[in-house]
Image: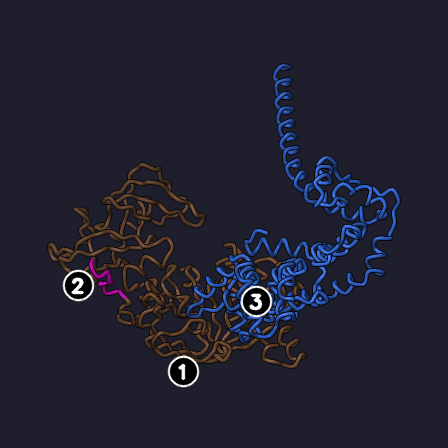
């Protein structure tokens, strides 16, 4: 158990390819931290640098009180679960789990005890004599976790460990990993490109793009107060709706103007935008599907009558507990979440209400969230 | 309705016929070359159980003529050997003569073993380590060095023969088994074959082992070698076959006939001893065939995974 400190970490590959830029972060002892971002954003590189599988070009990495930049992987007291599990195919499940302990020359009975304990936690007792090729994907995933936990390391590193599983198994394993973290009370650093995994599992999330940290915060804060356009679009399913607009003041009221169609901004938020000097600026309006409502949700719509626009329904997607409408408004397709029994005909007109108190406003040039709800101030952004 | 059914039946028949023809062509194209390659093997083994007299009668036309005689040449052109597969009388006389009466055969057999086994062991060991370095380590000049290996591998044996001879001479190894064993051990082919094979092993296995606490040598012994078993076995068999059959090297490096291997024995069987040739050949081929049969699966898998054609 230990805290991790990454200070101004950079990774530049030969040919001057920068994978990670100026990455600074403190991971608390026993914390479950998630690194999330699209492919090529540098999240796996950060994890591999922590593991000692990639050299750190510049910056400082501490595990506990030790600077470990030049310490070999085996001496960092970490364990890693790989995306493809990396189970040795020629060894049995038992031998795979015992591999690290045997290398450390632990007594045989101690190895047996530790492996059996880990197998008990993960329900692998009956599989110990099988080879990885003879067990299912989910079981292999458990063996990979087992191989990590028998070592009782200070830090667990997980590189997209669920990405090779089917959706159902992935959900199940998510819960098991959360339970495992609670039981082991050890620091977990988990890499994923799946924002659902990030939101459901982590105590804190680091969102990355192009080697830079975009936002570091708790999952709900990132969802509610994204620091910029990228984070707003990346976190959340379905993704946030974005529409180009400009902020105007007329008759003492602030309006978001979408090429002629106007949406009233609530007075309190309008005041904040005014104070921030956002008026008469080109912005991008961001609003999530659940903050929009359809024609039939009249009670909802009446709450913000001056924030209603007419659109054409392109199609609807029924997902059981809810339905998503894809509506074209002001030349842009927006996704609206409605009740599952919402009646809509593709091609027909739909009135869509905007809950502007939940809307976000991003600067068109810098893409930073300029609205008062932004978590920018508290997000711990360390990138350039 | 009837005509439709008849038509359908007709189509079924023609599809089946076409499949049969395709299969016949397929089998034919495989059987013909197989028969072509098997013919001398079967002939050698069956003829090795014939008596000397029977061999003499069957192969008189090709062995009993003096090349210096013009008339004999003309006669030889007009006569043919008789390929008989089934002996009139099955006898082990040829084997008895080769193994018991003619002592050089056994001596030369052991010479072959003493030359081939160290080369197989040495090249397998060296190539496995070198291939591990080429496949899994990043170091300056790696690609250039490997390119040199390929160049050496592509060179015909005759090109490197003279430099090898000069070096062996300088080292005082001429007429010594080591003059053949050393160049054999440091062959480039094995490195090439195993490098291709080891590149298929995912790096994540090595990284997992590294995180688990293994060093480079432990990774080699516990991960790379077990996972390259087929490739290593394939290499061992190929090196064995290659070196068991060597002719030029012992002929040039080992002037002393008493040190020469079995591969040179067959060429020395005199016309008068032709009755022994088949048994000697059969015995000579046996280790190669056995090694192939034993390691056939490894060989096929090893060659397939290394992406090398045989």
- Residue under pointer 2: A271
User: Which chain: brown?
Assistant: A
* Label 1 Cα neighbours within 10 Å, binned few <14 / some 14-19 / many ≥20: some
Please identify the residue farthest to the bottom as the structure is shown. Answer: A65
Question: Mark 3 or 2, which is nearer the eye?
Answer: 3
Residue span colored magenta: A365-374
Considering depth in this image, is A292 or B36 the residue closer to the camera? B36
Up-down relation of residue A76 to residue A330 (above or below)? below
Circle 2 crowding by C-alpha within 10 Å: few under 14, some 14–19, many from 20: some
Q: Determine whether B111 is above or below A296 in the image.
A: below
Q: Main secondary structure of the magenta part?
A: loop
Marks 2 and 1: in contact by CB < 8 Å?
Answer: no
Q: Which residue is mark 3?
A: B165
Neighbours of disc 3 within 10 Å: few (<14), some (14-19), many (20+): some
Q: From the viewer's perspective, is B59 left or right of A117?
A: right
Q: Which residue is labeled 1 in the image?
A: A67
| Badge nearest the viewer, 1 or 2 | 1
Q: Are marks 3 and 2 on the same chain?
A: no
Chain letter of the residue beneath label 2 in the structure image: A
Q: Quadrant of residue A11?
A: bottom left
Which residue is nearer to you in this view: A362 or A37? Answer: A37
Could you tell me if residue B224 is visible in this image? no
Q: Secondary structure at mark 2?
A: helix
Query: Do the residues at pointers 1 and 2 share their chain?
Result: yes
A147 to the left or right of B255: left
Color used for chain B?
A: blue
Q: Chain of mark 1?
A: A
Q: Please give left or right for residue B13 compared with residue A281 in the image.
A: right
Residue shown at the point (71%, 58%) measured from the top left: B291
Disc 1 on helix, strand or loop?
strand
């Amino acid at each position: 158990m230990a805290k991790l400190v990454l200070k101004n970490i950079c990774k530049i590959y030969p040919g001057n390819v920068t994978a990670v830029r100026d990455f600074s972060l403190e991971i608390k002892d026993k914390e479950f931290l998630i690194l999330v971002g699209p492919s090529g954003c540098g999240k796996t590189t950060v994890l591999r640098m922590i593991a000692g599988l990639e050299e750190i070009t510049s910056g400082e990495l501490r595990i506990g009180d030790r600077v470990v930049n030049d310490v070999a992987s085996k001496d960092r007291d970490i364990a890693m679960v790989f995306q493809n599990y990396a189970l040795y195919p020629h060894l049995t499940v038992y031998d795979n789990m015992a591999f690290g302990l045997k290398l450390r020359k632990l007594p045989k009975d101690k190895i047996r005890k530790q492996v059996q304990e880990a197998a008990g936690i993960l329900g692998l007792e009956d599989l110990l004599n099988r080879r990885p090729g003879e067990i299912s994907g989910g079981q292999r995933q458990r063996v990979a976790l087992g191989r990590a936990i028998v070592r009782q390391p200070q830090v667990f590193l997980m590189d997209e460990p669920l990405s090779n599983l089917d959706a159902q198994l992935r959900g199940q394993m998510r819960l098991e990993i959360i339970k495992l973290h609670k039981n082991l009370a050890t620091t977990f650093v988990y890499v994923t490109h799946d924002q659902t995994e990030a939101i459901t599992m982590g105590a804190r999330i680091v969102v990355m793009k192009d080697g830079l940290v975009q936002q570091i915060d708790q999952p709900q804060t990132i969802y509610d107060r994204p620091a910029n356009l990228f984070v707003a679009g990346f976190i959340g399913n379905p993704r946030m709706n974005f529409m180009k607009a400009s902020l105007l003041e007329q008759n003492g009221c602030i309006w978001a103007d979408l090429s002629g169609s106007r949406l009233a901004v609530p007075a309190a938020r309008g005041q904040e935008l005014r104070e921030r000097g956002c008026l008469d600026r080109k912005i991008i309006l961001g609003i999530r599907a659940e903050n929009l409502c359809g024609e039939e949700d009249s009670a909802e719509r009446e709450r913000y009558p001056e924030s209603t626009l007419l659109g054409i329904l392109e199609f609807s997607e029924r997902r059981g507990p809810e339905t998503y409408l894809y509506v074209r408004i002001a030349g842009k397709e927006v996704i609206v979440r409605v009740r599952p029994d919402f009646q809509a005909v593709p091609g027909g007109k739909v009135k869509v209400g905007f809950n502007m108190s939940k809307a976000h406003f991003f600067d068109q040039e810098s893409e930073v969230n300029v609205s008062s709800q932004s978590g920018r101030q508290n997000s711990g952004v360390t990138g350039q | 309705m009837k005509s439709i059914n008849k038509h359908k039946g007709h189509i079924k028949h023609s599809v089946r016929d076409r499949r049969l023809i395709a299969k016949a062509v397929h089998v034919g194209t495989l059987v013909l070359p197989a028969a072509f390659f098997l013919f001398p093997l079967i002939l050698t083994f069956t003829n090795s159980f014939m008596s000397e007299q029977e061999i003499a009668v069957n192969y008189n036309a090709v062995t009993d003529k003096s090349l210096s005689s013009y008339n004999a040449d003309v006669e030889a052109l007009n006569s043919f050997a008789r390929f008989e597969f089934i002996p009139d009388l099955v006898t082990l006389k040829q084997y008895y003569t080769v193994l018991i009466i003619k002592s050089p055969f056994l001596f030369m057999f052991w010479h072959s073993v003493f030359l081939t086994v160290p080369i197989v062991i040495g090249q397998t060991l060296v190539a496995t380590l070198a291939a591990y370095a080429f496949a899994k380590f990043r170091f300056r000049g790696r690609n250039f060095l490997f390119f040199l290996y390929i160049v050496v591998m592509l060179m015909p044996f005759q090109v490197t023969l003279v430099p090898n001879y000069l070096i062996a001479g300088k080292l005082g190894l001429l007429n010594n088994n080591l003059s053949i064993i050393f160049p054999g051990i440091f062959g480039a082919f094995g490195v090439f074959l195993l490098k291709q094979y080891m590149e298929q092993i995912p790096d994540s296995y090595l990284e997992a082992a590294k995180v688990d606490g293994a060093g480079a040598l432990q990774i080699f012994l516990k991960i790379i070698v077990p996972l390259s078993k087929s490739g290593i076995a394939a290499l061992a068999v190929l090196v064995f076959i290659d070196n068991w059959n060597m002719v030029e090297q012992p002929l040039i490096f080992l002037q002393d006939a008493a040190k020469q291997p079995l591969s040179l024995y067959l060429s020395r069987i005199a016309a008068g001893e032709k009755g022994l040739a088949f048994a000697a050949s059969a015995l000579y081929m046996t280790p190669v065939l056995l090694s192939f049969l034993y390691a056939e699966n490894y060989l096929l898998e090893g060659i397939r995974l290394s992406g090398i054609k045989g």
